[in-house]
Structure formats: structure tokens, C-alpha cells
Amino acid sequence: MKLLNLVQGSEAWKAARAKYFTASEASIMMACSKNVSRNELLAMKATGTEQEFSEWFERNILDKGHEVEALARPIAEEIIGEQLYPVTGVSDDDTLLASFDGLTMLEDICWECKQFNAEKAALVDQGVLPEVDQWQVIQQLVVSRADKCLYMVTDGTPENTHYLWVALQPGNEQQLVAGWNQFAADRENFSPETVKSEPVAKAQADLPALIVELVGEVRNSNLASYQDIVLERIRSVSTDLKTDQDFADADSTVKFFTKAEKELDAVKKQALGQTATIANLFSTVELLKEEMRTKRLELNRLVKAKKEEVRLNIITAAKQALAEHIASLNAQLAGHHLPVITADFATAIKGKKTITSLQSAADDELARAKVEANQVFSRVQANITALNELAADYMFLFQDAANLVQLDQGHMSAEVKARIADHKEAERKRQDAERERIRQEEAAKLKHEQEMVELKRQEAEAELQREQQAAQVVATPTPVIGPASAANEPAQVNIPAEPRFKMPTGRRQQTEEMISVSRKEYEQLQRDSRLLAALQAQGVDNWDGYDSALESLIDAA
């Protein structure tokens, strides 16, 4: 907060207030004031004609308020436990101004003092901040960044002092800022209208007194001239109702005719009392009475129909303005849409009598709905940005994004993060299962290859053994028995120096090489199996990482 070195109530202070949106105007801007309408404040701000501090206002409100504040300040300081100083400050962005009845030195507590009012005091006793002062207090807290405000209703005496503590609630500041932003937009688009005073019905000129004297016959009567005047009056009544003045005149005429009809009834009864032959009198009276009644009913129906037409037109125009505002916001949401923003214009204008008050009430409700739409728009827009940032690579998880972006930002972010975390965990489990499946397949394949190599080795060794045995059998010398000697000496056996059959050198070498290769393949497969297990233990789960990991394992070996 930036403090302004100004004395509250001074001319410089009044001049400074004209440059900002002030706390005392906040309730008017939010259509919570009973004395000034939002449209009136809008017109004053747009045209620079605000006369907020008239002589009467200063004498009866400000001066008296300062007296009460002076009496109540010690009471407030005792409650707070610190001294209070009247100051004026503006928000850091130089848009909002607040004049504080009191602020502590650390600016952590502010004080708002209101003159005693029985209705406000009753609300305070119930722990309720009066709506007419709610937004003034909220703006003071927003500008000062104080922790809380001591709101007090008092006449300066302890026995008539009622107070409660007020702190900002979630959304208060956003709603206040949105309200002023919408007010600023309305001010820029403001189109001044001709200021109309409250219509006053034209005074109805009295009809001439109808005189009838009867003694068996009508002796004296101005009935003929009376008839002419009444019929002329009836025919001059306008039924084209457009303005508040027309409605006021019509209402007055209806009441006038009702009164005149009753007077004619009285004359009729008077004439009957004179027991004369008064057929002409009665027929004339009945004629005039019927003419009045017809015109009265016609005017009454017109007044009701026109009022209903005006109300309907105002409501329709307000609904259209809100729909156009929401459409302009939706156009900025990249395919998303705001939720339904409700505005009860019919209830807002209920009980209003004049066109001005009807329009003002509808405009207040329209402004409220626009502020709500702007707040929702800001939330949805922020959620769209957050969703695009948080889930840039996971948008397939958010088919319901249209609903998600309408949640509170904290809830939406939590939901997005939870879904992504769940997806990552599921994907991790899937990848782990896939790696386990591949590992098992590779292990089974390796085992099969080892078994096949071992089988080949065994077959090769068996074949080699069979060939060696066969070679040994062929290579065993066959004894050559010569003729016996005369002395019956054993015959001589001639053993050849070299076997007659020898295994081909090429075949033997081929068999030995086959056995050697099988042994090498088997040993290599055993090494590969151990390396695969080591690599998987290190977390290498794809073939691309095997080369560098193998080098590390080989270096370590």
C-alpha cells in the first residue's frame, strides 16, 4: 500500500479521491447501497460531475461522524491493544483508494467506525457484517493488506458500542477487482441519457358541480353544460403511454374518474330522493357514468399492459446484453465454454414503479452477472493454460477437459496430476511386465540354444569316439601265420609295421574342429547368459544400451 499525505476531508483529499475507485463507493459499485444506484455512480464517474460531499453531507454525516470517531477511538484502541492512526492509502497498482478511520503502526489491523444504527447493531450482534458496508471493509483490507478489520457501530459510548472482526474470505478480493473492472468497462461505454425528474401527475381540474333540483320535475340543472365538459375531458385523455410522465398521468386520471363516478352515483341518489320524473336526468347520468367507466377501464388496462411491456423489454434487453457478453468471453476460450451464468432480472426489478428504477435494477443485476462471468472466465482461462502446461504429453487422458477446466484451479491441478501419476505408474508396471516377459523369453531362448549346442557337442564327441573305435579296430594287425617247422615249432606271425586302414586326415580334423567350435559356442553362450543377467541387474532394458554396458562389464572383468 502507498500512503498519501493527505488530511481526510480536505480539498486535496477530495481531489485525490476523484482519481481512484474508493472504498466508500465500493458498495454502490456492487449495487448494495440504499441511497445511490450503480447507474448514478456510473454517470457521475463517466461525466466527472460527482458531488459526493455536499455541504449538507459534510455537516450532517462527515462532521458528526468525526465526532463519533473521536469518542470511539479510545474504545477501539482498548479492544485492539494498540494506537490507531487515520490514514489514506492506495493499492500498489494505483487503482483502489481507501480512507481508514484507524490503522495500526504495523498496518496489520484497520478500524472502520459507523454511526450507531439499530438495524446495523442488531446484525453485528449476530456476527453479520451489514451488506451496505461489506465491500467498503473488503476494499480496505485489500488496499492495506491488513490481517483483519475491527468493524464498529457506535455512538461513542461503551454501552452503545457493537463490533465484530472481519477478515478477507477466499474470493473476496477477486470479486471486488472483477466488479471494478466491469465498472471501468461500463464507464468507457457509458452513453449519457437525459436526466429526468420523477414525473408528477398533472393536476386534474375539478369538474363543475352538478346541480339538480327536483320537485316532481327537473326545475334547475346544468346537466347539459356538465355533459359537454365531461365528454370533452374524457375525449382529451391520451392512451399512448410511453414515458414515466404518461404513466403517472394515466394513474391520476384513473383515480379522478373513479371519484367522479362516485359523485354521479351520489347525484343520482339525491335526485331519486326528490321523487320526480327524472328519466332524462338518469339517462344522462348513466351515459356519463358509463363513459367514465369505459375510459377508466381502458386506461387501467393500458397502464398495466404498458408497464408489463416495459418490464419485458427491459428484461429482454438485459438478457441479450448478458448473452452477448458471455459469447465474447467464450470466443476467447479456444473451443471451451463458460458454464451457465444465471441472472434473475425478474426478481431484480420486482417492486420497482418507474422506468428509471426498473432500468437501474436490471442494470445492477446485469453488472453482477457480468462480474460473475468475468470471474468464471478468468478461472477457466487459467485452468486451460495450466492443463496445457501440466498435460502437454498426456492430453489423451483428458477427454473430459471441458468439465475439468471449470473446476477450482487447485482441484483441477490435483486431478490432472493424479491422472498423470496413475498413468505413469500403470505404464511403469506395463513396461516392467514387458521387460520381464522379454527376459523370460531371452532366458528360455538362451537355455534352448545352450541345450542345442550341448547336444551337438555330445553328438560330435560320440561320433568321434565311434570313428576312433572303428579306426582302432581296423588298425589292429591281423597275424600272418607261416608254415609250421618240422620240429612242430609255432608258426611265425608277421605283424605289419603300419595298419592297413587309417582314418582320413581331413575327416578327423573336421570332427575335432566341430567339437572345438561346439565347446567355444557353449562357453560363449554361458558368458552371454551371465552378461545378460548382469546387464538386467544394472537396469539396462533395451539392446541400445548393451554396447556401452558390455564395455563397462568387460573392463571391470
Image (cartoon, rainbow, N blue to C red):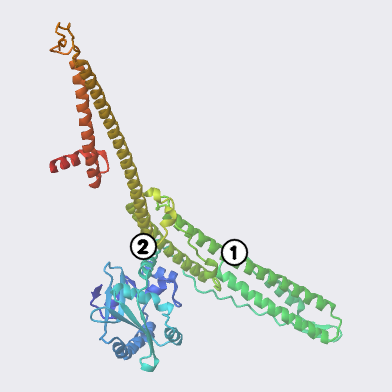
Label located before the other in sequence (2 or 1): 1
Residue beneath disc 1: 309
Mark 1 falls on what kind of element? helix
Q: Amino acid at mark 2?
A: Gly
Reply above or below: 34 against 396: below
Q: Amino acid at mark 1?
A: Glu
- Residue 77: percent from the left, percent from the top? 29, 88
Answer with left or right where residue 298 lies relative to residue 495: right
Reply above or below: 365 against 398: below
Residue shown at 29% from the left, 36% from the top: 446
Residue in the foreground of this view, choosing between 448 and 331? 448
Determine if residue 327 is in view. Answer: yes
Reply above or below: 454 against 210: above
Quarter occupied by the C terminus:
top left
Question: What mark, if any, has residue 334 been given in the picture?
Answer: none
Residue shown at 68% from the left, 68% from the top: 298
Residue shown at 45% from the left, 67% from the top: 368
Residue in the foreground of this view, choosing between 96 and 165? 165
- Residue 485: percent from the left, percent from the top? 15, 6
Residue in the foreground of this view, choosing between 419 and 492? 492
Mark 2 falls on what kind of element? helix
Residue beneath disc 2: 410
Query: Which of labels 2 and 1 is toward the front?
Result: 2
- Residue 14: percent from the left, percent from the top? 30, 76
Residue in the foreground of this view, choosing between 292 and 221? 292
Determine if residue 51 is in view. Answer: no
C-alpha separation, residue under disc 2 versus residue under disc 1 = 46 Å
Answer with left or right where residue 81 lies relative to residue 556: right
Reply above or below: 372 against 472: below
Quarter occupied by the N terminus:
bottom left
Residue shown at 49% from the left, 73% from the top: 197
